[in-house]
Image (cartoon, rainbow, N blue to C red):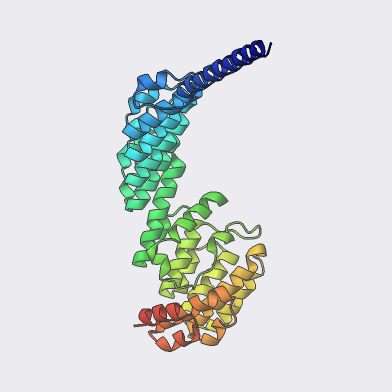
């Protein structure tokens, strides 16, 4: 009787072992068929799940930078494959293989801008092509390229930015006339922000404040051309150029800045500028800080630097040292590293 029980137990154990072995075999098979593996498209094709097959092909395509493989992937996933290869190879042609025209144009634009290649932009659809051409033209400071831009808005922005940069760099107000005086606030702010990043604007050394913010003040007419004339007037200390600026508050600010720069009745002009800050709403305190910074630099007054926000004090002392070539101003800077940079900049 005991022997019979042992036989039943042995049979049950055998069945269990066989079942476990079969389960492990199936698990191994599923692992092989579900998990991306292999180094050929044929290997990827053996995978059961569609997402796994596509992931496998995507990895192969990107790894080998073979864009033709991306075509084996269906739907939007193929565009992702093309995009990765285009970015890694800087190939606008690969961008053009994408099925989504908008994404393809965005891809082409990014590569053309990075390469500074104006001709690449033509492969994108509008308005991406014009946006791309404008960015490359501005980067190259090439006015002739602006004229070939189909979209009139981008063409105008392109010419305005370059003319504004030239005006400031050469201190030549004549170029300001070629800067648009559009009343569109977003366009004006965009142009001003771009000109403000130029080397010519950097020469103002803090004498001009948050001018792109002036565009959005409800009680003020201010445009990119006004900004250009105001900046050049300030650089030259020439108040007569302010006659080219929009009448009212904009013209008064121009006169105040240019007058301060020329040291003509500077105290009264800085007071006028501070009065204008009161109208700037959320930008009022920033405006006040910038005017104080301008006054400190314009008058060589280190005491005024101490009245500024802590984030501006170091900048103020460094600008004083560099402007007047006097390292004494650097002694106010406690940070040893910045102090040394200040001293170097004062020579």
Instruction: Note whether 215 is above or below 110 in the view shown.
Output: below
Does residue 147 appear in the picture of this structure?
Answer: no
Indicate the quadrant where residue 204 lies.
bottom left
Residue under the point 44% across and 70% down? 233
**Of 292 and 225, which appears nearest the observer?**
292
| Residue that protrudes farthest toward the bottom in the picture | 328
Residue under the point 37% across and 51% down? 138
Q: Is residue 93 left or right of residue 269?
A: left
Placement of the C terminus among the 4 image quadrants: bottom left
Residue under the point 40% across and 86% down? 327
Instruction: Note whether 299 is above or below 311 in the view shown.
Output: below
**Of 68 and 331, which appears nearest the observer?**
68
Position in image of residue 7 (x %, y %): 61, 12
| Residue that protrudes farthest toward the right in the picture | 1
Instruction: Note whether 166 is above or below 65 in the view shown.
Output: below
Indicate the quadrant where residue 115 lies.
top left
Q: Is residue 148 left or right of residue 28?
A: left
Q: Is residue 336 left or right of residue 16?
A: left
Position in image of residue 200 (x %, y %): 38, 66
Position in image of residue 28 (x %, y %): 48, 22
Placement of the N terminus among the 4 image quadrants: top right
């Amino acid at each position: 009787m005991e022997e019979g029980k042992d036989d039943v137990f042995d049979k049950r154990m055998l069945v269990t072992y066989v079942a476990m072995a079969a389960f492990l075999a199936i698990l191994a098979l599923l692992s092989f068929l579900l998990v991306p593996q292999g180094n050929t498209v044929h290997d990827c094709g053996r995978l059961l799940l569609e997402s796994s097959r596509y992931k496998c092909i995507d990895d192969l395509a990107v790894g080998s930078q073979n864009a033709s493989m991306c075509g084996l992937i269906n739907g939007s996933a193929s565009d992702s494959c093309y995009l990765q290869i285009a970015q890694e190879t800087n190939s606008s042609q690969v961008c053009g293989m994408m099925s989504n025209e908008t994404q393809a144009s965005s891809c082409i634009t990014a590569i053309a801008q990075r390469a500074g290649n104006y001709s690449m932009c033509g492969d994108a659809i509008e308005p991406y092509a014009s946006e791309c051409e404008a960015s490359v033209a501005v980067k190259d400071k090439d006015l002739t390229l602006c004229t070939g831009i189909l979209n009139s808005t981008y063409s105008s922005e392109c010419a305005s930015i370059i003319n504004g940069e030239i005006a400031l760099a050469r201190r030549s107000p004549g170029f300001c006339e070629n800067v648009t005086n559009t009343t569109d606030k977003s366009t004006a702010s965009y142009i001003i922000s771009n000109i403000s990043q130029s080397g010519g604007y950097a020469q103002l050394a803090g004498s001009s404040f948050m001018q792109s913010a002036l565009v959005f003040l409800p009680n003020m007419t201010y445009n990119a051309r006004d900004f250009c004339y105001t900046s050049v007037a300030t650089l030259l200390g020439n108040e007569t150029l302010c006659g080219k600026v929009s009448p009212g508050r904009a013209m008064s600010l121009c006169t105040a800045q240019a007058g301060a720069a020329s040291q003509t009745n500077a105290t009264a002009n800085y007071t006028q500028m501070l009065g204008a800050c009161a109208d700037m709403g959320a930008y009022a305190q920033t405006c006040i800080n910038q005017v104080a910074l301008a006054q400190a630099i314009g008058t060589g007054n280190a005491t005024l630097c101490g009245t500024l926000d802590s984030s501006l004090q170091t900048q103020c002392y460094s600008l004083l040292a560099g402007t007047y070539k006097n390292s004494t101003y650097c002694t106010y800077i406690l940070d040893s590293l910045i102090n040394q940079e200040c001293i170097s900049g004062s020579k």
